[in-house]
Image (cartoon, grey):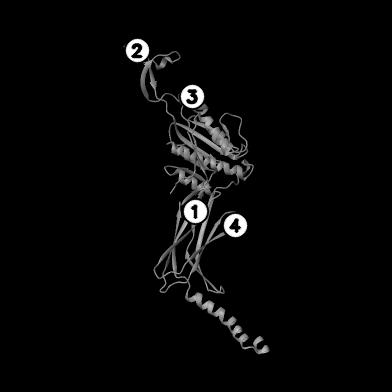
Amino acid sequence: MLGRVFGVVELYVIGAGFLVAPLLALLYVGLRRPRASAARWIHPRTLVAGDTGRVDIDVEHRGRIRSAPFELAETVSRMNSPEQVARLEVPALKPGVHTSAGYNVPTSRRGLVELGPLAAVARDPLGLARRRVGVAGLDVVVVAPRSILLDMPRLGHGMLGRELMNQARRMGPGDFHSLREYAEGDEPRTIHWRASARSESLMVKQHTVEGVRRCTVVLDTDLASYADEESFERAVVATASLVHSGDASGLNTRCLVGSGADLRGPDVVPHTLRVLAEVQPGAPAAPELDRDPGEGLGLLILVSGSRAGSGWQVIQTLVDPSLTVLSVSTDVAGPTTFDLPAGTEEEFRTGWARLVGRGRVDLTPEVNTA
């Protein structure tokens, strides 16, 4: 129109260019669209909150001619967080050539991080047209809660160890171990009369006393138990720590999360971390605390915010002379010696070390559950 009004030939050429350019752009991205396939490698597969994971992508060009440069776009999303997109530039590739690119996955909090779909995006040189082709599907990265490796109690060590020793004695002697001379305070029923007749002094039978063999950790998911979100997060960390520590110490470890998960067996740690990565507080859900099939002394540890939750009611109804009951409270601890306060992680670590009478408390940066 302007070329006709002003009689300028160049304006006709410019106008024609504006009409032709979008068509050429569409033709360009249609013919030079990425003919690629991609494989995604996530390491480690299970991360710990606070770590940084790595996603590497291997791309192969499967076209018959050299590709144009293109971009890989990967959607990264997680619950209650805005969606992000990782963008990776890929140079022009010859047919059958592989190349790789990657990006880091930040993990400030526990949860599930969803990756994908992964798309290859081609653009024309003028940026007028774009062609998007899917090259990989969805993947999920598990971000587990942090875990503190704690010393588990031994008989006679610390307040908890002394209580366990008394409980072991109440349950009766274990296997016969050896003979020793009678000492003041020994019970007459322990005297070995036949051995004493052959000796110049009274001899008593000494039996072994079994230590802790079982550990059951219960996470109360009742929303009424917790003052805020951070209180529940501390409870999740405490639960992961106790399950990890119990299993590492060779105890028969079990974890109950609300009423929805009963985890036990040789893979109790990875299964627990997977469940704890997603767990959220909700309506009252009392766990079912049936008698453990294991034998010997056991620990039952309730992790909660306070006594306001339904978990406390279940604990009070349990009668098992082989179990010693403890509580970990992230808001308000109870009045007894075995109500452990955990208003902060430091308070939980030092309180547990004081309870078991041992000094090692290690913060594990990562738990490999692959």
Lateral position of residue 231 relative to residue 189, left or right: right
> The disc labelled 1 sits on which kind of residue?
Val
> The disc labelled 2 sits on which kind of residue?
Ser
Q: Are marks 3 and 1 in contact (CB under 8 Å)?
A: no
Which residue is pictured at 46% across the width and 55% down the height? 42
Which residue is pictured at 47% across the width and 67% down the height? 91
Q: CA distance from mark 3 to mark 2?
A: 28 Å
Residue position for label 1: 141
Whichever of labels 3 and 2 marks the residue nearer the N terminus, that label is 3
Q: Residues within 10 Å of mark 1 (few under 14, many from 20)?
A: many
Whichever of labels 4 and 2 marks the residue nearer the N terminus, that label is 4
Q: Are marks 4 and 1 in contact (CB under 8 Å)?
A: no
For residue 196, which numbered disc appears in the image? Answer: 2
Which residue sits furthest top?
200
Taking 166 as reference, is 181 above or below it? above
Q: Looking at the image, can residue 1 be seen?
A: no
Q: CA distance from mark 3 to mark 1?
A: 46 Å
Whichever of labels 2 and 1 marks the residue nearer the N terminus, that label is 1
Q: CA distance from mark 3 to mark 4?
A: 54 Å
Dot 1: what SS? strand
Which residue is pictured at 43% across the width and 66% down the height? 37
Dot 2: what SS? helix
Which residue sits furthest right?
5
Q: Are marks 3 and 2 in contact (CB under 8 Å)?
A: no
Q: CA distance from mark 4 to mark 2?
A: 79 Å
> The disc labelled 4 sits on which kind of residue?
Pro
Q: CA distance from mark 4 to mark 1?
A: 17 Å
Residue 223 in percent (x, y) is at 61, 44
Residue position for label 4: 82
Residue position for label 3: 166
> The disc labelled 3 sits on which kind of residue?
Asn
Whichever of labels 3 and 4 marks the residue nearer the N terminus, that label is 4
